[in-house]
Amino acid sequence: MGKLTNSMWRLLGSQSTRNQSKSLSLIAEANEQSAWAEGVSEADVAETARALDMGEKKDLAKFLALVREVSDRALDMRAFDVQLQGALRLLEGDVVEMATGEGKTLSGAIAAVGYVLSGRRVHVISVNDYLATRDAEWMRPLFDAFGIGLSSVSENSTRDERRDAYRCDVTYSSVNEIGFDVLRDQLATTEDGLVSPVPDVAIIDEADSVLVDEALIPLVLAGSTKAQVPDQAIHEVVARLKSKHYEIETDGRNVTLTDEGASFVEAELGGIDLYSEQHVGTTLVHVNITLHAYYLLERDVHYIVRDGGVHLINASRGRVAQLQRWPDGVQAAVEIKEGLAQTDPGEMIDTITVQALIGRYRTVCGMTGTALAAGEQFRQFYSLLVSQIPPNTPNIRVDEVDRVYDSKVNKVEAIVAYVKQIHETGQPILIGTHDVAQSEELAYFLDKAGVPSVVLNAKNDAQEAAIIAEAGKRGAVTVSTQMAGRGTDIRLGGSNSDDDAREEVIGLGGLCVVGTGRHDTERLDDQLRGRAGRQGDPGRSVFFSSLEDPVVTRNLAFKRDPVAQSEDGSMGSKGVELIKQAQRIAEGVMLELHSNTWRYNTLVNQQRDIIVRRRTEVLTGDAAADELAELEPDRYKQLLEGTAPDGDTDKDAADKEDTDKQEGAGTSEQVAQEPVPKDVLSQACREIVLYHLDRAWTDHLAFVSDVRASIHLRAIGKQSPLDEFHKLILEEFASVPAEAIAAARKTFREATITADGVQLDGLGLHRSTSTWTYMVHDNLFSSGGAKALQGIIGIFR
């Protein structure tokens, strides 16, 4: 089975031994250069390194020897051979799999130094701000020693700080911050307003989280609008609905009224017809939005309420999603549901997928502890191959067989009993849960059983580093949501422990990791499991599941419920097989969702590229002024020379004004103004054209969103949803350039343009003064291809 699995991954481009002999040969040569590296003084490191030719094997070996020596001096971390091996594969453009705790951070920093010495500029992209900021500061002494400029970008960085950061040789940042900087640049009206640089090299930490999990949700920049949201009357009706009034699809992504529910709502709202022309596009839409808020979005699962506001939770990270809202009135609906003040609704200004964002870079590589399992996605969507790096010290963690139960109640009882038993020995325990509510519920039951615990979830994620760092102390019980991207090492004995405390915990068996249910992908399970047994430490792991877990209920259907094999509800080996089957189906669905996201967004990304090129042409040159001068020559001449609109001279205009006054006609609006300096006029033309180009793109994205939401219905008419989607948005996009320039011509004729610039506000042409990001609901195509796939799989169960 092992040989078959390895062969399969090689066929998929995930080659664990790809070019490793070359890497090992270089590392052996580097070891021979150790004495030379030790002789390089600290003052000479930067100059010596820059004199190396990174394309020559001998110089590359010298670089490895030098960077190992310098990391020892500057960081007190002497790179292992496997860390150098990982850095070499990163320099070759691979995604490297290195086990949790094997030092990916140092490997990434070494690769970044290598790229800079080759004349490249590097972004080290992480899954969150915490890791990006921590790693930049942690590795700073290494970069300083080589004379390499280093910076980091976080959500708290100002625009000027971001611009300066991106000018450095190496910039650490989260994928979201880089993505939104790229999007916000599409709001700039002057070249000086641009922030993000030309992308060159991307080294991606937690590559599967960034490139696979995050790729299902596009980055969306939104701005204020005056759209209507559901009123209080609709909320009061929806809040009183009973289970017979609505249906939730098995995947939990959609909720609809039943016939009885529709009749109830119509009666409660005064005897209206929801499906009449008067209400179908308004009241019915608001009812559906409110249904979504009340029956699909759960407090402490999808969001938390804190400081008087609704804060979304990023499920793949287990943290609050800063500056994110739900679109289409859903945010306001949840706020009304929670009795909070409503925030302004918004509209989509721009969007970009992770694939498109990463596709901008000339070179992409990455690292993660679970790369092989995502090998097909790396190959298919990013043309990336995987190299597996062996651990420096063999893994001795004991992974127990899953324990599966018939119900959630029996599963929780089993977890509490197991944790209580382990806790009595003093062995530290880390418990992984799926959401805030589950973490708090389990902590409550543990407390009732006499087991005190510390909870880490989105409500206290600011304390995550301190909480996780102490999870290895004797007697510690830590209950945490999603562990991917937590970053902080769990030191056996605690963060400040001495050798005696560490040895005591080692004697107890190291860290015990308990999973409270399988995720939709085994990668996330492995990331949790990998918290134990790091760098040769002992450890153990076990997962508890039930047939009521989401991974089962969403992916398996039983004609007859399986019967437990014992009184405690244990399902034995049959239960283990059912969980594995459910997870395989979930992973297949996720791959299909990713494929759908890619297929449906490819054309939109191409259209965005056209808009970006046009915008860049307007922003960085005089294209706008040249075009408007050609299309509106009289108006352009009037503004530039100060002549009246009809071509009269200043004297003629003055005479005409005197005549008008004598005739009681009032002051003429056709009086000439002061000439507008050419550079000011060029900027005015630029702002006018950019406004209408951006407006046209925003309207196009709204059209795309509307088409996307209903395109799966085309399958009912035996049409290809994908083909129809492409046809519709191609036809619509074809009119975007003409509409934008026509609107710009009209504004150019009507706007007040003086030596101080153009006044667009007077015409009601306002740009959003505040922006935020949208939390898009999983994948809008889920009701199409992915459900069909689930149906096909169901046939063969």
Image: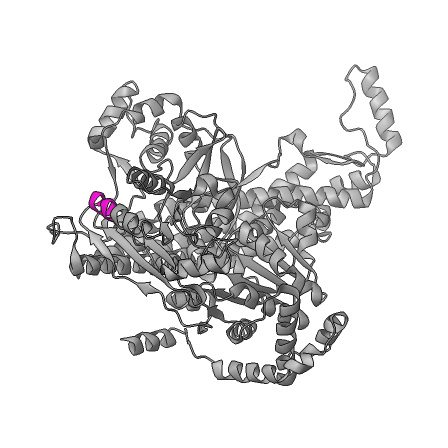
Closer-to-camera residue (497/15): 497
Residue at point 36%, 65% (across, down): 397
Q: Position of residue 174 (x, y in %)?
A: 55, 53
Quarter holding the C terminus is: bottom left
For residue 362, what is the image quadrant? Answer: bottom right
Q: Position of residue 634 (x, y in %)?
A: 75, 41
Closer-to-camera residue (153/414): 414
Residue at point 82%, 32% (across, down): 673
Q: Position of residue 34 (x, y in %)?
A: 64, 80
Q: Is residue 430 above or below residue 757?
A: below
Residue reaching furthest front? 500
Quarter holding the N terminus is: bottom left
Magenta range is 408-414
Q: Position of residue 471 (x, y in %)?
A: 43, 51
Q: Is residue 122 above or below residue 679?
A: below
Q: Main secondary structure of the magenta part?
A: helix
Magenta span includes 409:
yes
Residue at point 68%, 77% (across, down): 38
Left or right of 258: which side holds 392?
A: right
